[in-house]
Amino acid sequence: MEYAAGLCLELGFDGVDINMGCPDRSIEKQGCGAAMIKNPAKAKEIIQAAKRGARMGRVDGIPVSVKTRVGYYQNQLEEWLPAILAEAPAAVTIHARTRQELSKVPADWERIRRAVMIRDELSVDTLIIGNGDVLSLADAHHKAKTYGVDGVMVGRALFGNPWFFNPSKSLPVHLTALPTHGVNRDSITAVKEEEVGVEFVSIPERLRVLVERTRLFVELLPFKNFSIMKKHYKAYVNSFAGAADLRIKLMEADSPLEVEQLVEEYLSAVNINGQ
């Protein structure tokens, strides 16, 4: 970790973020990711090593931060978070679920409020960033204000939604790639729909951005398998007439040109160009 952080510094990165929340089993088998929650002593050593490599705190250094969860099998904030904060990382991003919960239950932002309180009680300067079930930019601002965090991290709400940070365009809440179970969408919708002057993104624009993203994927990541890009198609191609059939055809495509042709054929057939 010390060497890797030093390499990040040498290559000109702005910081090093250590993922101590990843639930992937192959990562956990190495004692990494969310498995770090079970080994606070080792987690502390890793943060120390990364800070040495990144020269954190020095004029020529870069910050080291940590992303984690509230616990492994259960909420362990009272023990786990102070252990991390003792090493004074620049920031800690808290995902408001345990490793056991994955994304099967609603994110509990009251846990994140408690994380802020723990930080304040310990009188450390580490920033606390909240994460989990953020559906829109307005919702992110709302959560930041309500729970007192220093920032908000966004994940799945960006799937198929590169307009997330656009001040004048937005996807309707029901199109965001998040589970519906347990999420209070009424309150989130109220936050979002109150935005003034926001235009909902049309189906043609969604599909043409998908084409653009496919083209950029091949141009910028030529060493990646094209099938990786196809994993994102469902996030763009859903909740409109003929979406399922179009998605099936797109999964058979082998190039950006084929994807573009299929999209243009669909738009011509349903005659929704520009709507």
Image (cartoon, rainbow, N blue to C red):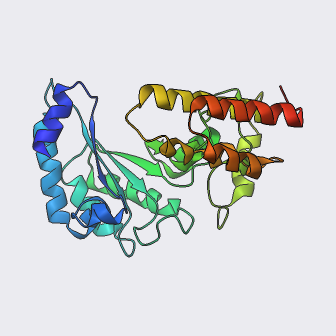
Residue 31 location (% of width, % of height): 21, 64
Evaluate whether residue 242 shows in this view: yes
Q: Quadrant of the C terminus?
A: top right
Give residue 182's quadrant in the image: bottom right
Q: Which residue occupies the foreground of this view, 256 or 201?
A: 256
Lateral position of residue 258 relative to residue 218, left or right: right
Indicate whether 81 appears above or below 189: below
Indicate whether 16 appears above or below 185: above
Q: Residue at x 65, y 27 (%)?
A: 167
Residue 230 location (% of width, % of height): 56, 45
Lateral position of residue 7 relative to residue 201, left or right: left
Lateral position of residue 127 relative to residue 239, left or right: left
Give residue 138's quadrant in the image: top right
Evaluate whether residue 199 shows in this view: no
Residue 236 location (% of width, % of height): 66, 42
Indicate whether 145 appears above or below 104: above
Q: Residue at x 36, y 58 (%)?
A: 22
Residue 256 location (% of width, % of height): 58, 31
Lateral position of residue 68 relative to residue 148, left or right: left
Q: Residue furthest bottom?
A: 73
